[in-house]
Image: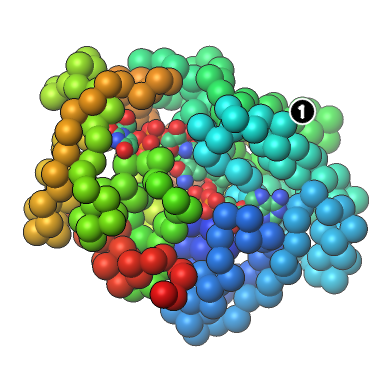
Amino acid sequence: MSILITGGAGYIGSHTCIELLDSGYDVIVVDNFLNSKRESLNRVQQITDKKLTLYELDLLNREDLENVFVENTFDAVIHFAGLKSVGESIQIPLRYYHNNITGTLILCELMQKYNVRNIVFSSSATVYGMTNMSPLTEDLPLSANNPYGSTKLMIEQILKDVFMADNSWSIALLRYFNPIGAHISGRIGEDPNGIPNNLMPYITQVAIGKRDKLSIFGSDYDTHDGTGVRDYIHVVDLAKGHLKALESVMNTTGVEAYNLGTGVGYSVLDVVDNFEKATGKKIPYILIDRRPGDVDACYADPTKAKKELGWVAEMSLEDMCRDSWRWQLNNPNGYEEK
Ligand code: NAD
Ligand code: WQD
């Protein structure tokens, strides 16, 4: 089985490449390294002792992407490629819409042309909008609060329409909750540029001494300790979910959304506490104002993925903290050797 992975050099993509290679799939990655490094894929190949095929290209370049379809035959596509920063999407919305939506349109047009009808798409819990209705089920109304979220919502709609027009397509919309952690080898992980926006990379940078202290955004939420609650999921569990979704799209037709989360919410203070216990590192913090756009609590009801895909997240928050820290400790500058 041969799988096209867009954005395969990125955080979730690289972990999924490992699971795919380990399971015997042929992996063809397209990535323009807009938000990743080639080194992640070198390491994927070292860890698995298997080769993958890499095309360095921009999805927006139709000719380059078409060449990949001409040179290969695919059983399915996993579509990770996209820009993902909420804050940046508010500053440069056109770039986000163009990259994420046009990139997906070009990809789907080529899939249609070359008779590839199976796709697993990286959606996000952000499509549930600013609701405090957790646990979230897939049938809840959807909305977007920022351009990034709008791109995910629009792409979900585009893929639903593609299926409506041609029932031979098979589409899984995977709504990720909060992926953290890293591969157990400590050789691949999340490598954010500049000051991290997300909680776990910020915590690991405090632990390694790159940042003084964590600022906790809001301590007056309606949660057990006042700090925001999220559904953190180990990136390797998430990667395994893609294999289950892949098996499903290759065996059925339809369009289905699945929550990929643990179903358990932890607060920011829970994460700090677990990190300290798992690593022995102290995380100094201050409590500051809420971050605009944040909700009290956001966690999945993962029942559908369990029932229909046979997938459940297995790793604990302590596993996630330990593995995030191992990656940070072994790679203080991420993939940059300094
Ligand atoms: P990432 O930025 O690490 O990976 C995305 C990859 O896509 C990068 O390697 C980037 O270089 C590539 N890319 C972007 N635009 C491209 C283009 N036009 N052509 C070719 N390559 C391009 O992000 P990630 O955390 O691995 O996320 C993967 C997907 O999952 C994204 O679509 C993201 O929106 C979605 N998602 C991520 C999270 C999260 O918290 N990490 C949560 C929900 C959904
Ligand atoms: C988690 C919790 C913060 C940083 C984002 C996107 C979402 C999805 C996943 C892509 C919140 C708090 C954070 C810090 C803090 N991405 N926090 N101090 O906001 O749940 O989700 O990533 O689809 O769309 O919005 O994740 O890691 O930023 O925040 O107190 O320095 O940690 O307020 O409660 P979030 P996060």
Point 82% across, 45% down: residue: 106
Tell me the quarter of the image containing the N terminus. bottom right
Q: Between 13 and 139, which is closer to the camera in this rendering?
A: 13
Q: How many marks?
A: 1
Q: Position of residue 212 (x, y in %)?
A: 21, 48
Where in the figure is residue 256, as x and y percent of width and height?
A: 60, 34
Side of 95 where 332 appears, left or right: left
Mark 1, secondary structure of its residue: helix
Q: Is residue 123 above or below residue 50?
A: above
Q: Nearer the viewer, residue 304 or 202?
A: 202
Q: Which residue is mark 1?
A: 161
Crowding at mark 1 (Cα within 10 Å: few <14, some 14-19, many 20+): few
Q: Residue 234: where, in percent of width, then height?
A: 34, 52
> Residue 58 vs residue 13: left or right?
right
19 vs 305: above or below: below
Q: Is residue 176 above or below residue 328?
A: above
Instruction: Pick the quarter of the image with the C terminus.
Output: bottom left
**Residue flagged by tag 1: what amino acid is it?**
Asp
Quarter of the figure with residue 271? top left
Residue drawn at (17%, 33%), measured in percent from left and top?
A: 286
Residue 305 position by quadrant: top left
Is the distance from the Cβ of mark 1 to the nearest ligand 1 atom less than 8 Å?
A: no
Residue located 51% across and 63% down the image:
14
Please identify the quarter of the rendering in which residue 327 is found.
Answer: bottom left
